[in-house]
Image: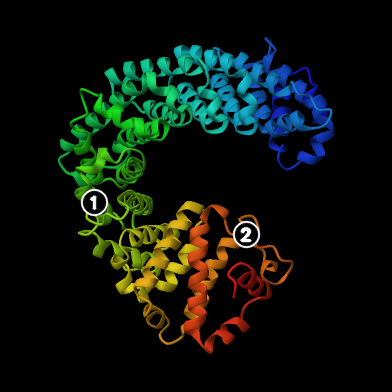
Amino acid sequence: LQEGLGHTDQWVREASILALGAIADGCKEELGPHMAQLHPFLLSQLTAPESLPQLRCISAWTLGRFASWAVDQMHAEGGDTSLVGRVAEALVGRLLDRHKKVQVAVCSALGVFVESAADLMAPYLDPIYRTLMQALQMYRTRSIMVLFDTLGTMADYIGPAIGEGNLPGIYVPPLLKHWNEIAMENPFDRSLLPLMECLGSSTVVIGMNYQPWALETFEMAMSTIEACTLVFAHEEDALDADDEMADPMICAVDLIDGLVEGLGPNIAALVSGSSRFSQTFPNVLQNLAEHIIPGVRMSVFALIGDLARQAPALIEAGLPNLLSEAVKSIDPTHPAACNNAVWAIGEVCVRCGENSGPLTPHAPELVQRLIAMLMGNMLDDDGDPVTVPGLAENAATTMGRLASVNANFVAPELGRFLTGWCEGMSKISNPIERRDAFQGFVAALRANPQSLQQAGGGDISGVMTSILFAIVSWHIPQDDMSGNLLNGAYGFQPFPSEFGELLASLRQLVLDLKTSAGNSWSQIESTMPVNVKRLMKEVYLI
């Protein structure tokens, strides 16, 4: 390999660099001692004026394969702290290459390098963005789509630094100009999809600094949705419509959602300030929620959930219909739309507080659908059981939020799904969602304490064990699921201090369970692992 890398024939060097990149992961440790010589060599092969296009391509790709090594040098004692900057400079210097395959390879390698370097790229963003915008003027088709992907990667991995100072002014206006020019010719041009995606990622992290372009972005996204809606309206058979036809609409909805996340409550003023779409926006949401394409419903329920959190006034008027469509979309045959519909309903519950009015007409059917999710009773069109990752914990959260609005929505049938709810709650990772689930659970159980007997079919100790296991899940570290946690060295984490009110509620619940269990409590306690007994004594005071 060393002989091939030093060969005078560029084709031999190209093949040898390919081999080097291919073994980058599998031989990382073994190559370590040689990287101080290999890495500068790769940079030289990329930047040398005499290098063949194929040699430039493979050098860029291989530099991407060794991105983590370059980043490690920034943190290593005695490492080369200028390495990230030199790699960035070399890649950016080749972005304007006239050869299309080199453009694609270098732009892709820049994206891969950003994934490893993340915010270490911040000092170099000005020249990177300026060069990418020059590339935007010369790239075509495949190259330009990779460029948009790289811009999205920069937003996702570098974070808020991309929105600081004058940086957004370098790249946002040219992107919007490009979008407008292409959309005027063909609003369904596939290159617009990664463009909208990269703008969506950018709006989230740029935040309020995106305001100068927010209205234009919103109206262009709404225009895309409008154009797609017209196309679907003229389809002779709506059932023949496919996801590809709806892709521009989906990306446009996701972009609006990015604006909601980035601008927060200010999105309400933005929408009302749109002379073209302020009046029709609620109707557009309704039409999207009813759309035949599941991917459209998936995106719009994410948007509705975020609007419930940030600007509920924008969905208030249409809430009855939106909730009705969300409940209908709790269908496991379309997992992503189902998950987002459940989440959106939960966010609406949070916004309702103790005002149960908007939810009352929908609660009975909603509870039945959530029960099926919690108990694993969801069936597909053929009658076969359906398991969707994340659905049980999502349902557990929304059931809790619904019960917090009005415990009587949930309490009457609690015995049917109490154990499934406990299992779902134990899997929730987001602390706010977990808190909401448990608060609603306690409220429902208080409203129907007889559900303990109903749930176990006479085995009350089994039901109580399910509840206790769910409570113990609060104390299991996210990075430690080892079997030794229960009986080995004590490693339970404290209950989150910010949820003191819930802890008091759970302490009282555990005490009440012990009291109601009577003589059965000693049997329950005897089956507890040693560390759970200690946890119950020290934290729950029993």
Which amino acid type is marked by label 2? Pro
The mark found on residue 494 in the picture is 2
Report the residue at 65% width, 63% height from top: 492
Q: Residue 210 carries which label?
A: none
Residue at 60% over, 33% down: 115
Looking at the rendered structure, the secondary structure element under dot 1 is helix
Q: Is residue 166 left or right of residue 11?
A: left
| Vertical order, 461 against 82 (above or below) | below
Q: Residue 228 placed where, x, y %?
A: 24, 32
323 left or right of 38? left
Q: Can residue 318 be seen from the camera position used here?
A: yes
The amino acid pointed to by label 1 is: Glu
Disc 1 residue crowd, few under 14, some 14–19, many 20+, Cα 10 Å: many
Mark 1 sits on what residue? Answer: 325
- 65 or 202, nearer to the observer: 202
Q: Quadrant of residue 30?
A: top right
